[in-house]
Image (cartoon, helix red, strand yellow):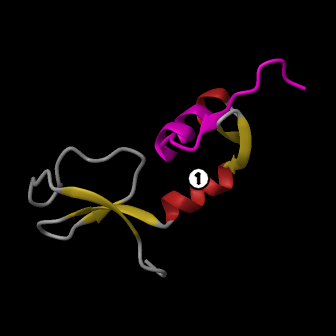
Amino acid sequence: MSPHVITVTEDTGIDEAARLMAGERIRRVPVIKRGKMVGLLSRSDVLDFFAKTRWTCNVCGRWERGLERPERCFSCSSTDIHLERADPGH
């Protein structure tokens, strides 16, 4: 067993958890709430989340995938961008 277990809380963003898992080269991380384990986040959970979500421009509708929120839309330069679940099949 590891002497130091790396954990996240239920309030940890998926992007932050993904960076932590990649940086520490770990496949799973326990999710802690009030000192108790309430879940286990896996690398496949993270991949599934990002495969089914995208950043979408509220002005022109252009979307892209990625961990980081784009500063501006590539097409129209708007900063009005939100994260949404992608339609199945897209």
- Label 1 CA crowd tier, 10 Å (few <14, some 14–19, many 20+): some
**x then y, percent, for residue 28:** 73, 43
Q: 65 or 12, which is in the foreground?
A: 12
Q: Quadrant of the C terminus?
A: bottom left
Is 12 left, or right, of 78 in this rendering?
Answer: right
**x then y, percent, for residue 52:** 49, 67
Q: Confirm whether residue 15 shows in the render.
A: yes
**x then y, percent, for residue 79:** 14, 50
Say if the magenta span includes residue 19: yes
Q: 20 or 3, which is in the foreground?
A: 3
Q: 35 or 5, which is in the foreground?
A: 35
Say if the magenta span includes residue 14: yes
Q: Element at badge 1?
A: helix
**x then y, percent, for residue 7:** 67, 32
Q: Quadrant of residue 84?
A: bottom left
From the image, tell me which residue sits under label 1: 46
Q: Quadrant of residue 68?
A: top left
The residue located at (20%, 44%) in the rendering is 71
Q: Is residue 8 above or below residue 82?
A: above
Query: Residue most toward the front?
Result: 34
Query: Residue most toward the right?
Result: 1
Magenta segment boundaries in residue numbering: 1-21
The three-letter code of the residue at mark 1 reads Val
The residue located at (15%, 56%) in the rendering is 80
The residue located at (77%, 19%) in the rendering is 4
Q: Is residue 72 above or below residue 50?
A: above
Q: How many marks?
A: 1
Q: 60 or 2, which is in the foreground?
A: 2
Q: Confirm whether residue 27 shows in the render.
A: no
The residue located at (51%, 46%) in the rendering is 14
